[in-house]
Amino acid sequence: MLYTNYLISAWRNIFKHPLFSAINIFGLAIGLTSCILIALFVRDEISYDSFWQKAENIYRTHITFSVPGRDPMYIAMAPGPIMHALKRDYPQVEYATRISIQEPTIIVDNQYFVDFITLADPEFTEIFELNVISGDVSQALNSTSSIILNETLAQKYFGQGNAVGQTLTIDFDIFKKDYVVAAVIEDMRKNSMVQAEAIIAIDEPAWIDQPYMFDAWFSTNSQLFFTVPSGTSIDSLANTLPDFVNRNFPKLPFGGEDIKTSDMISMEFMNIQDLHLNGNSDGEYHETGNKNTVIVFATVAALILFIAAINFMNLSTARASSRAKEVSLRKVMGASRKDLIIQFLGESILLTLMGMLIALTLVELALPVYNDALGKELGINYGSNDLLYIFGLATIVGILGGAYPAFILSHFRPAETLKANKSAETKASVKLRYALVILQFSVSIALFVSTAVVYGQMLYAKNKDLGYNKENVLAVKEIYRDVVLEKLDLLVDEIERMPGAIAVSWSNFMPGNSNNNNTIVHTEGQSTEDGILLGSRTIGYNYFSTYEIPLIAGRDYVRGRDRAVMTDDLRAGNFYTGSLVVNESALGRLNLGTAEEAIGKVVYVGAGQPEENLTATYEIIGVVPDIHFDSLKLTIRPEIYDLEPEYGSVLSARFNGDPNVFVEQVKQLWEQQIPSIPFDYDFITDAVAKQYNAEQGQANMFAAFSGLAILIACLGLYGLASFTADRRTKEIGIRKVMGASVFDVVKLLVWQFSKPVLIANLIAWPVSYYAMSIWLENFVYRIEAFFIIGFCLIAGIAALLIAWGTVASNSMRVASANPVKALRYE
Amino acid sequence: MLKLQDLTKAYRTDEVETVALNNVNIEIEHGEFVAIMGPSGCGKSTLLNIVGMLDTPTSGHYFFNGEDVAGYSESQLGVIRKQHIGFIFQSFNLIDELSVFENIELALLYHDIPASERKERVAAVMDKVGIAHRAKHMPSQLSGGQQQRVAVARAVVGNQSMILADEPTGNLDTAHGQEVMEMLQKLNEEGTTIVMVTHSPSHADYARRTINLLDGHVVTESMRA
Ligand SMILES: Nc1ncnc2c1ncn2[C@@H]1O[C@H](COP(=O)(O)OP(=O)(O)O)[C@@H](O)[C@H]1O
Ligand SMILES: [Mg+2]
């Protein structure tokens, strides 16, 4: 009975004070919405690969090359032969598989497709459970002519019918072979760093002409996963890795006699569940997450909820005095303090639950956009415990926000509060409210500053001069296939002749994508052992002029004038001197003096596989500045640019005029010349921007949530301002009678709310300066820390303006009211 | 000093029109002490508010020192008001959050008077009404009579030439009421014009002239010899 009474009273109270209730419910709804959305993101990020049965015991092997004078090269891959050595040396290793993802041409019924094919060892199926729809996966990888397809690809190739038993052909360029579909599996889960659409066995003999794929110790072209029995100490295994490296790796071809292999090469095991958040982009097949991002967002979620809970507390305590009479009457009627606390807590929980219902609606509305921005498929699973968690969250917020007001309200003494004309509020509760407003705005301002820094850094990175002109360059991809390379000269010629074409070249890398090819270079008078490891890229003729890179000295590669050194010639004992362009850093590392002095000097460059001990001789014909071909997250390597007339993976064409018209011409040419491979292109500007896609998404998300946090804080301020203005009408009336103008009064009220915002700035500035200057240290190329001070000032002014805007309307209303009205009824 | 001519005030709320003052004609000279009497709701406060320029008449003229202020805007009125008119209310209308000193100082705050001079003038007026020892107290710590003395001090600290008092003794016991009346009398003797609303005939006797209102009309005016 009593509880029905509480419920009725709570319900009535909610509607009796619509503004108060609306602000509370809406603020909570926004807070809970943000919190749920962020929680979905965080849950997805930390859930990666935890669903495998053996998750606790699946590890991946990583390699770090630490070469003196170079940044350590950390690679999420391992050289192919390591797997065999690992299984031989460590009986603890139960199952092991390499995973290499290739993008060959697939031919089904004379139709051509280009798709990702996963190459794996037979034990792949022992480590990773595949959900079989039809066929049998257990023996599939024991045969070198079987293929496992996921549902999507099976349908793409064979339509609705059963794909098992059907045949398709895969053309890897190096070999072309038929495969029989052994099984169709469900598409793999998205929250995994192991994604396979089609799986075939690694057939080492078939790749023998490309030993770097699976057989070279100094090349990494596959990831290596293995399992150990439960209870195995991975640390004690990892401790023996230096010995393992020294025992198994061939002697390093440089660095001298005293250098142990383990000094430069180290191995590391990482549990599969840690890969997503701790992985490194180099050598990953799938996009990694970032542990810091997850922590930051979890914090933001907590802060937003905190701000919403503060609104709740503040508005409730502010309103408390107007409810003093109700409390006193209930007490006179025999209500105990506990009864009242239960009543008021119940009220706040009721409000939060209403907020929660709105929040669930908002979440469902926001999810499509949110998923799009994050590239995920997040959602609330209403069948699972999700709803329970959300209910729990709402209840906790209700209790947190309602406990203090309930305590305050239930404290009123009837004797005091029933006597009119006495402010029921204690000084302490006024002070607390003030402190909480300061806290809210500190958090909002800090979030504002952080957002500005994140954006500022991103804009800086996007607009940084990369050393080349990325505008108006079309990049044609997929040219590394034999069918394209055969026609490379023809393509270049034809494109150069097109209207709008300015220059055309090719390379074995795409600007904006990282490249980790390295080679040993030594100068005259040195031995190979003394050589240094330099980054190496291959390019075609006119590459630097195509990208409008001014040479510091010398010249670009010119057709007919410059000669490339072909590895096969070296193998055949046919030696001659080729041309070479190096960057400024490489010049410094090679000690070749100034750029002008370096021109004409001879250097020796390792060729083929290290074991082959082949050395090519080059004369330096050009020196270019250090160019950001890689991500800005990396320092520029010392690099050589090797001429490669017959090979490339990307063809670059600088053009002017309408990009669409130009692309259309190139596309027509491609389709006419290479009908078997789909035309695939990108603009360099877009390719470079793509590096920041994840950052852009996260920055947008960060900005959105910061904005929401500020919005919630403003809602609270608005409620508090309207409450205060109402409470101060008498005072304002008196002041106006005493001669205060409307402006005087507005100034008074606005100042009342400016003070906490100003104090909030004093708290937020040092905190955000400190935090964001640490964050910036993650970037090699970053904005100056003093920009943060500017952002602080802007945030401070913005917060003040927002606070003013929020309270101004109320203040104006109260200030322009006729004072007689305020003083009339006492 | 002031002259009301055919002054009418009507309140319009939800299509119901209340005529609070109907064709009122009153003239008050400098240095007068006028009492306004009449039953509740007859328009006394309305009259005082218009005289005090807190409200504007619906029609008619209001000459203040020869100037017709009837059509003036709120801010124009505010300028005249803060220079010439002080107020005393039945319910004191002190600001709870300010001390006695600050409450009195409020009347000078909006006058561009330097802080040091404000301090002097507030101190002097507190002496005059005998609450100097309570300067730092909050209104809630004072008795009703003391609060009203603060209100009187606040009404005169700006050297206002006219004080409007709306039932200044209505919330006070006999002894305290007497005190406030004596204070007003003293101010009047010093030259301040006083217009006071009261229900108490004995307090009205302090005034030299009494105006009786009924339903918005002036019914009688009497002068004491
Ligand atoms: N702001 C207002 N709105 C509507 N009616 C009002 C307002 N102020 C006063 N009145 C009405 O005008 C009449 C005179 O009021 P008032 O001057 O306060 O009377 P008194 O002070 O003599 O008791 C009353 O009928 C009152 O209800
Ligand atoms: Mg009245």
Image (tube, helix red, strand yellow):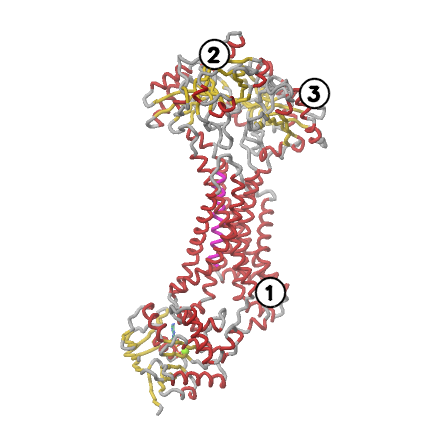
**Which mark sits nearer the N-terminus, 3 or 1?**
3
Residue visible at 50% across and 86% down? Answer: B175
Residue beneath disc 3: A88
Q: What SS does tag 1 mark?
A: helix
Q: What SS does tag 2 mark?
A: strand
Q: Which residues are magenta?
A: A697-719
Q: Chain of mark 2?
A: A
Q: Is residue A138 above or below residue A769?
A: above
**Which mark sits nearer the N-terminus, 3 or 2?**
3
Q: What's the distance in space between the residues labelled 2 and 1, CA to CA?
A: 93 Å
Q: Chain of mark 3?
A: A
Q: What SS does tag 3 mark?
A: helix
The N terminus of chain A: image quadrant = bottom right
Quadrant of picture, ligand 1 = bottom left
Task: Where is residue B19? Give x, y as percent.
Answer: 34, 76
What predominant SS class does the magenta segment belong to?
Answer: helix
